[in-house]
Amino acid sequence: MYKKFIISGGGTGGHIFPAIAIANELKRIDPHSDILFIGAKGRMEMQKVPEAGYKIKGLWISGLQRKISYKNLLLPVKWVYSVYASLRIIKTYKPDVVVGVGGYASAAIVFAASIKGIPILLQEQNSFAGLTNKWLSKKANKICVAYPEMEKFFPSHKIVYTGNPIRQDLIEKAIDKKEAKHRLGLDTSKSLLFVTGGSLGAKMLNESVVKNLELLKENNIQLIWQTGSFYFNQYKTMGGEAVLVQEFVKNMDLVYSAADLILCRAGALTISEICALGKASVLVPSPYVAEDHQTHNALSLANRDAAILIKDQNAIQEAVPKCVELLSNMEQREKLGRNALALGRPNAAHEIASEIIKLVKS
């Protein structure tokens, strides 16, 4: 009989794409697997998951606002409603395992699975565990982590060190740098800087680019600039022959292959991709995320000479000039890339999928 899995989580690409990578690997191992995603209504997973070919149900759930907000008054109502809806989903769907990839979208369904005695696997993407996964860890059978020394957050006997799952096409479709630049219509003799603040965008990174466009031009540096959905309309007219402005990069495999250097936030997915591909990077952690986890993520590379870390408050003045400096220093870029590659876990999706299947057998 075919196996049935629920995968839950979302809110940002950093949760969604690893979840899809796990689903793809489960399907690769057993094409007859049936997979249902659970997300939060109105969030980007409700679009991205169906685009990847999977079915998804949305819960009426939202996260805790970390400042005083009337929205927090609805949280108890949303929680009760979402747990009740999750219990109905489990009763109807009858999953063999429920997988939580973090974020508030996974809390209700994982909690409901614990009530029903369904095996649970959690995947923690950051080096500083989120509130949801710390709370749910008591109910989980296995916890797959991306960084060592996570015993300070989770029971050690439940932890499996796997790394973060990444989009496999980034590895499978990786090509020569010059060929990638050629396919993108860029000058193969010039350096390429790729700037990305993630699917939503990063204000400081965008402002850093705007302030230093002339500096990039003076140094013959080409730019692919993913502004994010919040900022695209503001910056879309700033493109040119050597500046490609995009809301969201769809051909990420080509862009990663072509990039000589990456300027980005320090989300778990981005860092995992940088390491798996061995790319040199300048990381500007967002200070606005829970438990300041992006700074912890970035330090895990910077302390091993695998990336350059610049604080958010210094980004406008320092980030792009530092990139210009690195783009003139191939030896240092290659060193950063080599050290990042040594930290990569390109088989993470397979290792996590294997742990999920073990829970079915047990």
Image (cartoon, rainbow, N blue to C red):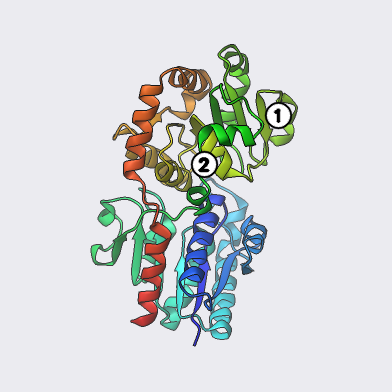
Local crowd size for mark 2, using a 10 Å CA cut-off: few (<14), some (14–19), many (≥20):
some
Which quarter of the rendered picture does the C terminus lie within?
A: bottom left
Q: Nearer the viewer, residue 266 or 327?
A: 327
Q: Residue 68, position in %: x, y?
A: 55, 47
Q: Secondary structure at mark 1?
A: helix
For the question of whether residue 339 can be seen, the reply is yes
C-alpha distance separating marks 2 and 1: 30 Å
Query: Is 152 positioned to the left or the right of 308 in the image?
Result: left
User: Mark 1 packing: few (<14 Cα in 10 Å), some, or many (20+)?
Assistant: some
Q: Nearer the viewer, residue 271 or 266?
A: 271
Q: Amino acid at mark 2?
A: Ile
Report the residue at 56% width, 51% height from top.
Answer: 13
Q: Give the mark nearest the N terminus, 2 or 1.
A: 2
| Residue of label 2 | 175
**Residue 218's spot in the image, x, y percent?**
59, 11
Against 271, residue 159 (above or below) is: below
Q: Residue furthest top?
A: 218
Which of the 4 quarters of the picture holds residue 245? top right
The disc label shown at residue 8, or none: none
Question: Residue 142, how many percent across, how many down?
Answer: 34, 68
Closest to the observer: 209 or 246? 246
Query: For residue 114, what is the image quadrant?
Result: bottom left
Residue at 28% over, 51% down: 148
Residue 108 visible in the picture: no
- The residue mark sitting in front, 2 or 1, is 2
Q: Residue at x 39, y 57 (%)?
A: 348
Q: Amino acid at mark 1?
A: Tyr
Task: Return the mark for residue 235.
Answer: 1
Which residue sits at x=46%, y=69%? 99
